[in-house]
Image (tube, grey):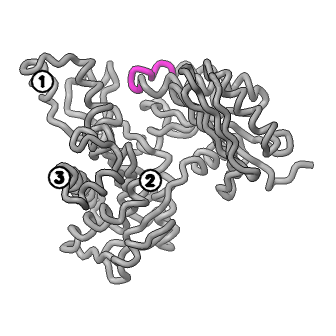
Amino acid sequence: MTTAHTRRVLVVNAGSSSLKYQLVDPDTGRSDATGLVERIGLPAGRARHTCSSGTHVHELTVPDHARAMELLRDAFAEHGPDLAEVELVAVGHRVVHGGADFSEPTLITPAVVDAVRRLIPLAPLHNPGNLEGIEVAQRTFADVPQVAVFDTAFHQTMPAEASTYAVPRAWRLQHRVRRYGFHGTSHAYVSRRVAELLGRPVEEVRSVVLHLGNGASATAVDGGRSVDTSMGLTPLEGLVMGTRPGDLDPGLPRHLAEVAGISVEDYDRALSKESGLLGLTGSADMREVMERREAGDADAALAFDVVVHRLLHYVGGYAAVLGRLDALAFTAGIGEHSPEIRAAVLSRLAGFGVELDEAANASADGETLITTPGSSVAAFVVPTNEEWEIASQAAEVVGAG
């Protein structure tokens, strides 16, 4: 008889040209194996599978997501762990955009697939790949329940005053124009973990979570519920990111069309792939930007200041929205690994009673309290674990949580 400790969820994150996966214990977050099939549909594809026996890499052509899923199954069969020897209770799919339709993780049915397809105009770069992953996983693991976990779902608790744009009624009703927010699984996991680190019920804690990676967003969390977030209809709004600008004057498209003849397509491409750190410095990598800043590069120094200024803008605004700020959390690649960014933000909040523990911040590795005991706000570094969040939510949906 299969024992409870062998229960696993296969977490799948399918993009337009990649398939990431992880086999996760939904109870403990333990990962038994991770993998990535990349350059799907392009020359010189690659499949990587990491498990207890090491990392196994194969260079080969991967014509489509169906072949990528075959490689996933072959990797488990050849290198382990053997999927036949665990109780695979669900396949949990990361789906970027659930619109206003989905506020919870959802068992995937034909109606759910149709709904995600209808939402493609809100996430044309992401939802098609997510759907490809769902459809091939349903064929490959036909007897395993499939669950969609939406990036946008956590933010569906935002009140109307936070999610509503002041635009024509027809836009809002007919074209679903509103703030949706993203990185929801990360914000959900980190905000709950912050409450645990404080030793307080999540219902009592008001926090701001800063998810800072190549994509970046801030969320105000009140009692475990998102009440405001920086990303909007699309992931372009809010903080400065690797290649995305964050907040802009809405009049910019017309201005550029008139003075430079820039089309909507060129404008969109520039905002998605040529802005942010890349637009300010020529590099989208914060590590390189920091090295250049240390060497005296003026563009890198300005980029750092712009990033910090935007972070402070949101932290201060969200503290006011919450009415009280108990904790501030830094997560994702930059949030977890840039003590300079953290120090710059927290030192600017000293006038509000925030006291940075410089030694703790400089040496932070994993979950770390980086403010002093006397600080008015507890600031933490909390490594995110979106895969565990997806696995636990998927297991709960199928009754195995």
Residue 317 in view: no
Find the residue positioned furthest to the left: 259
Name the secondary structure under disc 2.
helix
Q: Circle 3 sits on which residue?
A: 302
Cα distance, mark 2 to mark 1? 33 Å
Which residue shows up at 56% across the image and 38% down it?
149
Q: Amino acid at mark 3?
A: Leu
Most common secondary structure along the magenta stretch? helix
Does the stretch in magenta take in 120? Answer: yes
Contact flag, marks 3 and 1 (Cβ < 8 Å)? no
Q: Is residue 143 left or right of residue 389?
A: right
Comparing 50 with 19, the one in front is: 50
Residue 365: x percent and y percent?
A: 49, 68
**Dot 2, how many residues are within 10 Å of its Cα: few (below 14), some (14-19), or many (20+)?**
many
Q: Is residue 184 left or right of residue 11?
A: left
- Which of the numbered marks, if any, corresponds to residue 256? 1
Which residue shows up at 39% across the image and 52% down it?
211
Find the residue positioned furthest to the right: 1
| Residue extent of the magenta highlight | 117-123
Which residue shows up at 26% across the image and 36% down it?
275
